[in-house]
Image (cartoon, rainbow, N blue to C red):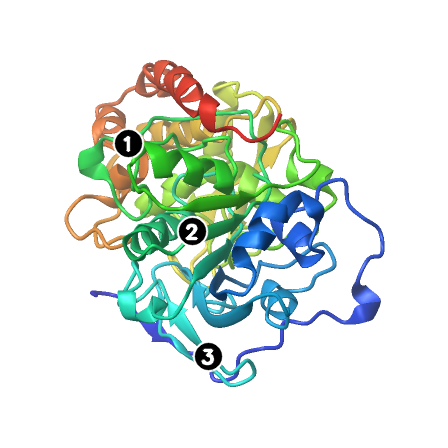
Amino acid sequence: MVGRIFFKPTAPPSCKAPSHHMSSSTPPVLTGLDLLATSDPSLEGVLRLLAGRTVGLLVNQASFDHRLRHAIDTLIGRPDFRVAAVFGPQHGLWGTTQDNMIEWEGYLDTRLGLPVYSLYGEHRKPPAAWLEGLQAMVIDLVDVGARYYTFVWTCTYVMERCAELGIPVVLLDRPNPVNGVDIEGPSIDRSYASFVGRFPIPMRHGMTMGEMLTMFNQTENIGCELHIARMQGWQRHMFFEETGQPWPMPSPNMPTVDTAVVYPGQCLVEGTKISEGRGTTRPFELVGAPFIDPWELARALDDERLEGVCFRPLLFEPTFQKHAREACGGVFIAVTDRARFRSVHLTVALFCAIRRLYGDAFEWKAPPYEYETVKLPIDILFGSDAPRLAIDGGAEARDVMQSWGEVERAFAALRRPFLLYP
């Protein structure tokens, strides 16, 4: 692929946490992995399904339980089933590929004595040969509540292959870190489907991974034998800190829950030549470019009177990616009320303000982007070209978003039968 690099780790790290760092307290929310690790009776059906089987694991570095024990180390020695292969998504099994759009190659893990297969490289859908001998696939990946996060799409490819081969899939469910209530943004025109949005779903969907895969399995006719290891204690209104779970940093540029809160809108900045803060310690919360006057932009955004957020003008210098080693003027996005904050509204207002203030200095990024070589990255992120055309035409943010409320309400009705938690 054009513009891609392959990375192969030379020494896979140990994933065991030091025992003195492990908490003895039980958090209010237990994930599917927490429950499987203890063979909780609530997972009787899953345990019965896995008993005596040879299984594959689709995991990454964030796949650990509340005691910081990684899924591989927790499950590999179990007497009731045998782990025979490990699969990893974008950013690598251990999150070693820092930037986005960096492919990685599979390898033999000498510590585990198991093959590790890359699902973000030559193949996104695993070849049938990789699943030979497997009798079940167990998935434990962390989603961040935004359509563009590729892990859920990796899961759909795996489910499709498993459906073809008659292999059941067990999904160990985890919280949506930005709550399971709020929905934001447009859906996808299917002609703009991509690896940052295979199926129609708003930018912020308010679902868990288990709920999304259950929905896609039916609405997209995947036909996989899918079993969800449900969480205990999770309620839809929760933001991640309320779960009592340790934040797993699911990818290299998702360091905090605050990052996840702004991400459903701010990921759109990847489709521009503006820096989204990659190469800084606060990706997606920082945004800017060398041509931007920070105080001018902050005043323009203040004039939008967006709820739950304020803007701090500043200069920053990314260490890599866009505008590396250049001073960028921009703003820090300070969320003051998560319940009222709408990240997609913010980012559309940001684009409209920069276009109005700086004209053609504001540019959209050209392809390739996430395996799409023709359509503009911003169009596949939005799910159509309509928002871009409106912004380029000088529209106000409210005009760009005028039809999205209807889309959000329709999706709320569509997802309702697939919700697993109160």
Disc 1 + disc 2, Cβ < 8 Å:
no
Note whether residue 272 is visible.
no
Q: State how far apart marks 1 and 3 are (Cα).
A: 36 Å
The dot on residue 188 is 1
The residue located at (54%, 58%) in the rendering is: 50
Task: Give the amino acid type for the residue marked by disc 1 in the picture.
Answer: Ile
Secondary structure, mark 2, is helix
Task: Give the amino acid type for the residue marked by disc 3 in the picture.
Answer: Pro
Image quadrant in which the C terminus is located: top right
* Of the pair 313 and 173, the residue shown nearer to us: 173
Whichever of labels 1 and 3 marks the residue nearer the N terminus, that label is 3
Identify the residue position indicated by label 2 in the image. Answer: 151
Tell me where residue 30 sits by quadrant: top right
Residue 26 percent location from the top left of the image: 80, 48
Picture layout, residue 300 above or below residue 273: above
* Of the pair 232 and 238, the residue shown nearer to us: 232
Image quadrant in which the N terminus is located: bottom left
The dot on residue 9 is 3
Residue 403 percent location from the top left of the image: 32, 15
Residue 62 percent location from the top left of the image: 58, 58
Which class describes the residues within 10 Å of circle 2: few (<14), some (14-19), or many (20+)?
many
Q: Is residue 60 left or right of residue 26?
A: left
